[in-house]
Image (cartoon, rainbow, N blue to C red):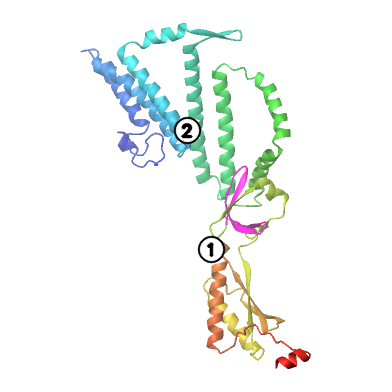
Amino acid sequence: MAWAIGRRRESSSVWFGRFIVDGLLFPLLSLALVYSAMLVVARFQPVALLHLAVPVLLALAGIRFLARVLTVVFPTSAAARLVERLFSWLAWLMAVLWIGGVLQPVLARLEALRFTVGKTQVSVLGLIENLLVAGVVLVLTLWISAALERRVMRQATGDLSLRRVAANVVRAGLLLVGVLAALSTLGVDLTALSVLGGAIGVGLGFGLQKLASNYVSGFVILFERSLRIGDTVRVDNFEGQVMDIKTRYTLIRAPNGRESIVPNEKLITERIENLSLADPLILLSTDVAVGYDSDVDEVQRLLCEAATGCARVLKDPAPAARLARFGADGLEFQLLFWIGDPANGQLNVRSEVNLAVLKSLRQAGIVIPYPQRVVHLVGSEATAGR
């Protein structure tokens, strides 16, 4: 039945898992069927085996629920795997005590163990129950936030940056609600947290100004959309593509594979060149020197044709060649051309244009001069040397 329901499941589903049997739905359905069979068959004969199956399936359902939620929310976290193993040991221990018939005496003993916290007496059993309830509340909160985050990232809007900030806000809000609910379950007076929150706020204001500024700047960037994921930017002469915008920093990846982690405050307070804000077109240039006896018009034509022949160079605006200066060794031209995909790299297209220019000038017999220097010898020592 679980297989038939989950044939079109997602691989990250909490209900079905990756292989149907490792999801939450399998032990829940099994538990429902076993309990139903126990109610029906118990009228006619003893059902000791079914009684044994109930605690096993309950423990398995709790373990699967915690494991699947932690896998979805924290797929690579070692701490999440540790929590999962600890809970598994505790769940199987409770199941063994239940099957062995000693669970009730153990619970009674834990209830009898009491200690005083302030003016309140707390039993060990009550503390364990409150911790379990708080843990369930937090896991449910993480599950709901992960599900809403996936839905927001898929359907909310076409802008990846706005989807990311919406997902962050949803997760932060739900986690805050979950933490408050868990603290309330543990018996913590939430009114006392207002004074503590004020003190923490003052401490953050003085001690964590930069950190708070980076977080605020991250939300400002995401809401204003001055930078978006996929934009090509230049920060402190480091040029690359915006790969991700976190709440504290922005990750920029250069075409050569190097990555730069830029604090969000820097992107707000300093001058940043966004090469993709208006349009993705970028003007590139390369310098070429030819001999003084070369035909200027022919050189300009050959340069433009060489650039136009490259696949990534745009035909509109068309490439242009200009006589930039009269150099010491020859006429220096500047070839200007536009590209529309800077994310694919700039050095590679500039190299392709340079190779095409070199090949075209050599075929036309136009000389690219070597640097030349003339040495004049003056005085009697120079005459004697000759």
Question: Which region of the structure is painted magenta?
Answer: 231-253
For marks 1 and 2, give the one nearer the viewer.
2
- Image side of residue 169 versus residue 32, left or right: right
Q: To which quarter of the image does residue 5 belong?
A: top left
Q: Give me the C-alpha separation between circle 1 and circle 2.
A: 38 Å
Reading the image, the residue beneath label 1 is 344
Instruction: Give the quadrant of the N terminus.
Output: top left
Residue at 67 percent across and 26 percent down: it is 197
- Image side of residue 124 versus residue 373, left or right: left
Residue 52 percent across, percent down from the top left: 28, 18
Front residue (pair 105, 52): 105
Question: Mark 1 falls on what kind of element?
Answer: helix
Reading the image, the residue beneath label 2 is 79
Residue 147 percent across, percent down from the top left: 48, 37
Relative vertical location of residue 113 with respect to residue 323 in this rendering, above or below: above
Relative vertical location of residue 258 with respect to residue 15 in this rendering, above or below: below
